[in-house]
Amino acid sequence: MTGNGANGATSAREVKISCRNIWKVYGPECDSYFDNRNGVVDDPSALCDRMRKDSHVVAASDVTFDVQVGEIFIIMGTVGLR
């Protein structure tokens, strides 16, 4: 699989981890927004607005990424919100 590196060059390394449509939401009953949808949302921006109005905190919305063999990938954030 090929992709663009930081300098725009293409690489042909194997994808080791592939993540699609990832959401991380803090708040009461946040699972109810994703019933049977597997994270796929028609309008992520509108859903984020609705979640915020319902007192939820959207930490990550509709995130997609690949980690290739040999890459180091770090996701940083809060341990939890209260």
Image (cartoon, rainbow, N blue to C red):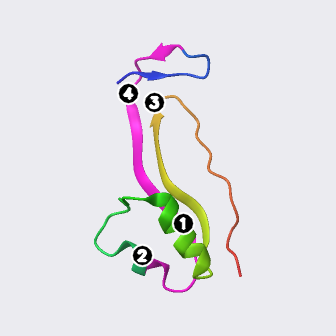
In this orientation, which residue lies closer to the viewer: 24 or 69? 24
In the picture, the disc for residue 33 is 2
Task: Provide the residue span drawn in magenta.
Answer: 9-31
Left or right, 37 with reference to 5: left
Q: Which image quarter: residue 32? A: bottom left
Q: Is the residue 62 above or below the residue 26 in the image?
A: above
Q: Which residue is drawn at 48% across and 67% down?
A: 47
Of mark 4 and mark 1, the one earlier in the sequence is: 4
Q: Mark 4 and mark 3: span between their CA atoms?
A: 6 Å
In the rendered image, which residue does mark 3 sit on?
Answer: 69
The residue shown at (42%, 75%) is 33
Q: Kindly check if marks 4 and 3 are in contact, taking CB atoms under 8 A apart as contact.
A: yes
Residue type of the residue flagged with mark 4: Glu
Along the polypeptide, which appears first: circle 1 or circle 2? 2
Q: Which of marks 3 and 2 is nearer the N terminus?
A: 2
Res 40 quadrant in image: bottom left
- Label 1 and label 3: CA atoms lie apart by 32 Å
Q: In this view, does 66 lie to the left or right of 58?
A: left
Q: In which quarter of the image is the C terminus?
A: bottom right
Image vertical order of residue 1 relative to residue 31, above or below? above
Q: Name the residue under label 1.
A: 48
Front disc: 4 or 1: 1
User: For mark 2, does the 10 Å Cα neighbourhood hold few (<14), some (14 to 19), or many (20 or more) residues?
Assistant: some
